[in-house]
């Protein structure tokens, strides 16, 4: 039940987006995330890029748990001492 396959570029109305790969940029908090070789549709006339929605969704799933971690990491350095890191080094004396 699909209609016409040809989808003209919404930007220039004449170009046809072609499937390709480009480096995707996104910001999480104030960190720039770059994803090389990200699937996208590139207009052959104006060069407008439309990122593949399915891949974008997967990327967001990958990045969203990280986004929480990044903000949690930002603490005063002094509180690092309170981190419950235990070194379990056992010294066996012979
Ligand atoms: Zn275009």
Image (spheres, helix red, strand yellow):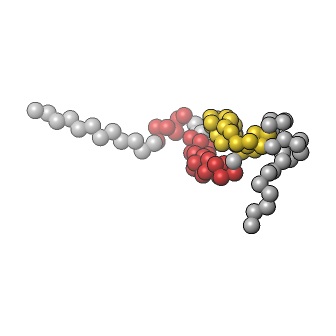
- The spot of residue 21 in percent (x, y) is 66, 37
Residue 60: tell me if it is visible: no
**Is residue 52 found left or right of 48 in the rendered image?**
left
When asked about the image quadrant of residue 32, the answer is: top right
Name the residue: 29% across, 40% down: 88
Which residue is drawn at the image coordinates 84% and 48% (left, top)? 8
Q: Position of residue 63 (x, y in %)?
A: 60, 46
- The N terminus sits in image quarter: bottom right
Tell me what residue is drawn at x 54 percent, y 34 percent. 77
Residue at the image position 64 percent from the left and 48 percent from the top: 55
Query: In x, y percent, where is residue 67?
Result: 61, 46
- Image height of 31 relative to 62, above or below: above
Percent x, y for residue 62?
A: 58, 48
Say whether residue 13 is visible: yes
Residue 38: which quarter of the image? top right
Q: Which of 7 and 68 is in front in this view?
A: 7
């Amino acid at each position: 039940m699909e209609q016409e396959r040809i989808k003209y570029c919404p930007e220039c109305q004449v170009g046809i987006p072609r499937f390709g790969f480009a480096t995707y940029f996104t910001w999480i908090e104030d960190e720039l995330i770059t994803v090389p070789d990200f699937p996208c549709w590139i207009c052959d006339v104006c060069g407008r890029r439309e990122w593949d929605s399915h891949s974008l969704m997967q990327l967001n799933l990958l990045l969203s748990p990280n986004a929480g971690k990044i903000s949690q990491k930002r603490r005063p350095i002094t509180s690092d001492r309170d981190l419950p890191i235990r070194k379990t080094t056992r010294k066996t004396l012979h």
